[in-house]
């Protein structure tokens, strides 16, 4: 489970990763809207669980007139992650190394990504509008077919995960208020 608090004066998101969040089972169509795993005021998140039991959550927050959208990964029960950030791609798109997102956040004194044994999260999108343009890196989450994710586990092996994106657009819009152009 994540606990989030805003660091006063910076607007940066600090996440403390404490207790693991058991993967919520997705609805038959894949994506669903569930309560976000947070100790803050309740809010919604879009969620999907793959056949292996890995859970992917998309949630948002508003900061200083911007909407920030995050992805959060909870591996299947019994799987422990190394502290390395995942790499993902949608369909045949270019791979996105979430460690680069972490580094960009660090350069701004903002926590945009982090991995612990049971959770990994990263910033997907930051915008002053709630419309993801076709040129935005977040847009494929609405129109893509499949998300391919690779992450190192604590035993040094790479875990390959596949998540369907069918139904993601409706769930993400309902949970975050963000829609695709």
Image: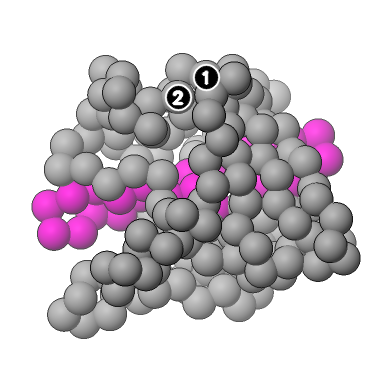
- Residue 110 rendering spot, x and y as whole percentages: 32, 69
- Residue 78 rendering spot, x and y as whole percentages: 86, 62
- Residue 9 rendering spot, x and y as whole percentages: 16, 80
Residue farthest left in this picture = 65
User: Which residue sits at x=22%, y=35%?
Assistant: 130
Disc ID at residue 174: none
| Mark 1: few/some/many CA within 10 Å (<14, 14-19, 20+) | some
User: Which residue sits at x=30%, y=23%?
Assistant: 135
Q: Does residue 62 belong to the magenta stretch?
A: yes
- Per the image, label 2 sits on a secondary structure element best described as helix
Instruction: Indicate the quadrant containing the N terminus: top left, top right, bottom left or bottom right.
Output: bottom right
Magenta stretch? 48-72
Disc ID at residue 144: 1
1 or 115, nearer to the observer: 115
Q: Is residue 157 above or below residue 33?
A: below
Residue under pointer 2: 140
Q: CA distance from mark 1 to mark 2?
A: 5 Å
Left or right of 44 on screen, residue 152: right
Q: How is the image coloured?
A: one colour
């Amino acid at each position: 489970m994540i606990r989030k608090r805003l660091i006063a004066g910076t607007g940066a998101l600090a996440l403390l990763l404490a207790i693991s969040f058991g993967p919520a089972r997705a609805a038959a169509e894949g994506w669903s809207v569930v309560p976000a795993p947070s100790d803050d005021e309740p809010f919604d998140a879009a969620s999907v669980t793959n056949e292996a039991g890995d859970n992917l959550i998309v949630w948002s927050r508003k900061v200083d007139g911007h909407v920030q959208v995050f992805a959060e990964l909870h591996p299947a029960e019994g799987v422990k992650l190394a502290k390395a950030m995942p790499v993902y791609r949608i369909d045949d798109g270019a791979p996105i190394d979430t460690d680069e997102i972490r580094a960009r956040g660090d350069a701004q004194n903002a926590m945009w990504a982090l991995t612990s044994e049971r959770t990994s999260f990263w910033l997907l999108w930051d915008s002053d509008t709630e419309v993801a343009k076709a040129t935005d890196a977040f847009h494929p989450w609405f129109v893509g077919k499949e998300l391919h994710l690779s992450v190192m586990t604590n035993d040094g092996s790479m875990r390959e995960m596949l998540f369907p994106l069918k139904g993601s657009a409706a769930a993400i819009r309902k949970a975050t208020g963000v829609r695709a152009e």
